Structures are given as C-alpha cells and as structure tokens.
Image: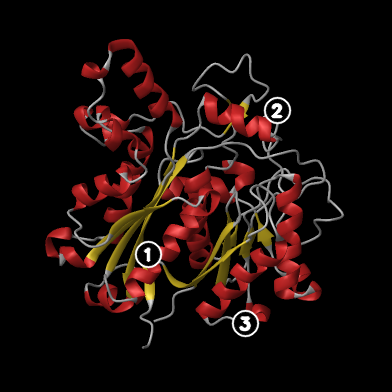
Amino acid sequence: MEKPRVVVTGLGAVTPIGLNAEDFWTSLTSGKSGIGHITHFDVSNFPIKVAAEIPGDFDPTHYMHPKMVDRTARAVHLAIPALKEALASSRLDMDKEQVERVGVVTATLVETAYLIKGKELLEKHGARRADPLFITKSSPSALAMQIGMITGARGPNTYVDSLCASGTDAMGAALNFMRLGYTDVMIVAGSDASLDPTTLAGMNILGALSRSSDPTTACRPFDLNRNGFVYGEAAGVVILETYEHAKKRNAPIIAEFGGAGWSFDAYDSTAPYAETQAIAMSVALRDAGIKPEDLDYINAHGTSTKLNDVCETKAVKILLGEEKAHKTPISSNKSMLGHSITATGLIEAIASILTVSRGILPPTINYATPAPACDLAYVPNKASKVEINNCLSNGFGLGGENCCIVFKRFAD
C-alpha cells in the first residue's frame, strides 16, 4: 500500500522565548535565551538556581474559562493557547470536518505538584474531602482529553510518555495513524509543566542538571565547559493533514512530514547509547526516502550534558560517516529553551518545520570552547541562512527510548 503524503498546516507555541509561534521563531533565530533565575518557587536551599520558565505575565484565563483553569493542570493551561493558534493558522474549521477522521496525540508528564497536593488534601481533610477531579487533573491523558472536547475531534485520542523523546514520539505516532488510514487530520500537542521542587531535586541528585548560577551561560550544548541541562517548560501544537485533504480545502501547507524512526537502547536507565541512536536516525531517513549523504541539517537533541552530547556526536558520525558528519550543520534549540522534557521534541519539531520552510538554521548559543569529543558543525552563536530541503530532528529519551523525525521543504 502506498503511503499517503502528510503535510503540516498549522503551528502554535507557548515557550520561554515567545508566547506564539512567530515570536518563538524570531527569538530562536536571533539567539535570544529564555533561561533565567527560577521564580516559580523558592530555591534558596537548592543548588539549582536557573530554569527556562514561561514568562510570568502568562495568564491562562485569557484563553480558558476560569472554572476550566481551576479544573485542569498547568500543562493544559500552557497548551490551550498553542492549540488555538495552531487551529487558526491552519484555517481548520471543525464544523466542516468529518470529526471521526480527526485524531489527537499528546505528549505530557504527570505533574508531581498535583500528586503531592492531592495527598496533602486527603491527609488534612480526610476521604470525604478528597479532590473529585484528582485523576482528570493529574493523568497524562488529561491534555488529549481536553483537546478532544474543545475541538470535537472524535477520532483516535491518546498520549505518549517516553520521557525526553515524547514530543518527537507523539509526532511519529500521529504520522502512523494517518498512514494506516484512520485519520485525515491529526492534532499533535506536547506540553510540560513538571518544573517543581520535587522533580528539580531528583534530577539534581542524578547529576543531570547544570548548577551554574549564571543563566546567560548555564546551557551550552556541545561546548567543552557544558555541565548539565537546564530544566524548562513549554507547549507546542502541530496540525497534520494528508496532502489530499489539505489540498482539497486549500489549506496553507508549511512543510511535508517525511518520516519517523524508532529504536530502544536496551542498555542503561540513564546513559545513552550511540549505536541505537544512529539506528533511529537511519530508520527515519529511510522512511522519508532520504539517503544519508543527502541530509541537509540536524536539529539535535543536544541537552548540554557531558554524556549526551558526546553520544549524539558519535551517533551522527555512525549515521553519516566522518566526512559527511563534519559538513552537515547541526544545532541545539535547548541552548535557548532549556529542556522541557516531554514537550521538547514537539517544540523542536516546530523549529525544524520552520527551518525547512524558511531556510534559516537556528544557532547553538553559548558555544565558545570546542570540545575534542564534540567536533561537528554546530551552527555556533548566530543563525545561518541557507536553502534546506530536509531536516532530521532527534529525540532521545532518558531510559533509552529514541525517536527521530524528518521534515521536507514542501513541493507541490
């Protein structure tokens, strides 16, 4: 069976560097960082002082009824404005759609803060005063459920949680729903608001976070002096359609979604493995019909940890060979956005889509001192304008779950 072409028709974003997709892209390509001192909670007794937070003037009641805000978690609050933006930019009119042919896939993480709050409420007031909406607030399916109810989409509705690969994984899952013929339209969302004291403390003990107190240089992917990732929060939404469906309704086509590839390290619960990362990249390129020698750009996972950046560099060399690897531009959006865990792959998908459609490579900021083990073309510090026909976006999850996706410049 011939695979249907799948295209991108709508984008929406709520990020530390822009509360809509256009502002996000402008900031990203100008090298603006969204990393600052943590304000969401008191970190005076924490060794971690910086994160990439959504700006404090963000108000969910501008996008949702106050009652609905009270009944949902922060990840939903961040995602709804991104959803509305994506629907508007795609010009998708759900009143004209066959709603059972519209599906939803989301990437989210259980918010520890809501689990703790629910337990505290139970202990303080007893079983008769427990939160009746505890499950719907705290479940990682909550976002998919809310999007389905808001839009009226009645096709497949599910979520993905493969940790740091989740956003990328959700994109791949949506692609497969469309290729298998279940849907004509997929709404794909990634939202993560898991930045809280419990999560931050645990990741710090693991040794994964940067302890830098200077937000301007805390995240420096592939640099010799990198010392850990910076936690972030964000939300993004992508509208996917089959080419035939988009063409029939004269939708604005931004880029083509070429393919996806998966692999699992089966190696370690925290350490990455280059050989299996390369497998996911290779499968994605093959699925998209692109030879490694024809790859134009890589949007790296690029977390700024000692292990990940070396491992990803090795994986790219396995995929492309030494000569091609050194010539292929690669950059990390996390240098400006931090790492928003389950949402990061979705945000980086949006960046990749705009990269191929506009021909601008976002930079890796804070790249000052080359590291001997990280010796690729990392698009240092300033954006570069070049014609890009295709882009590979990498998502590598803590625990070994890998997903990579490919976008192509759209040609009718």
Residue at the location (19% across, 48% down)?
Answer: 149
Q: Earlier in the sequence, mark 3 or mark 1?
A: 1
Quarter of the image that includes the C terminus: bottom left
Sort mark 3 into few (<14), some (14-19) or many (20+) by Cα contacts within 10 Å: few
Amino acid at the residue labelled 2: Asp
- Up/down of 115 relative to 104, above or below: above
Label drawn at residue 174? 1
Instruction: Say whether residue 57 is visible.
Output: no
Question: As drawn, is 66 to the left or to the right of 229?
Answer: left
Q: Nearer the viewer, residue 64 or 160?
A: 160
Q: Position of residue 78 (x, y in %)?
A: 37, 38
Q: Quadrant of residue 74?
A: top left
Q: Which residue is mark 2?
A: 214
Q: Amino acid at mark 1?
A: Ala
Number of numbered discs: 3
Q: Secondary structure at mark 3?
A: loop
- Say which element carries label 2: loop
Using the image, tell me which numbered label, if any, was put on residue 291: 3
Q: Tell me the quarter of the image containing the N terminus.
A: bottom left
Nearest to viewer (mark 2 / mark 3): 3
Dot 1, crowdedness within 10 Å: few (<14), some or many (≥20)? many
- Could you tell me residue 348's position as x and y percent? 52, 54
Mark 2 or 3 closer to N-term?
A: 2
Asked if the residue at tag 3 contacts the one at tag 2, i.e. Cβ–Cβ closer than 8 Å, the answer is: no
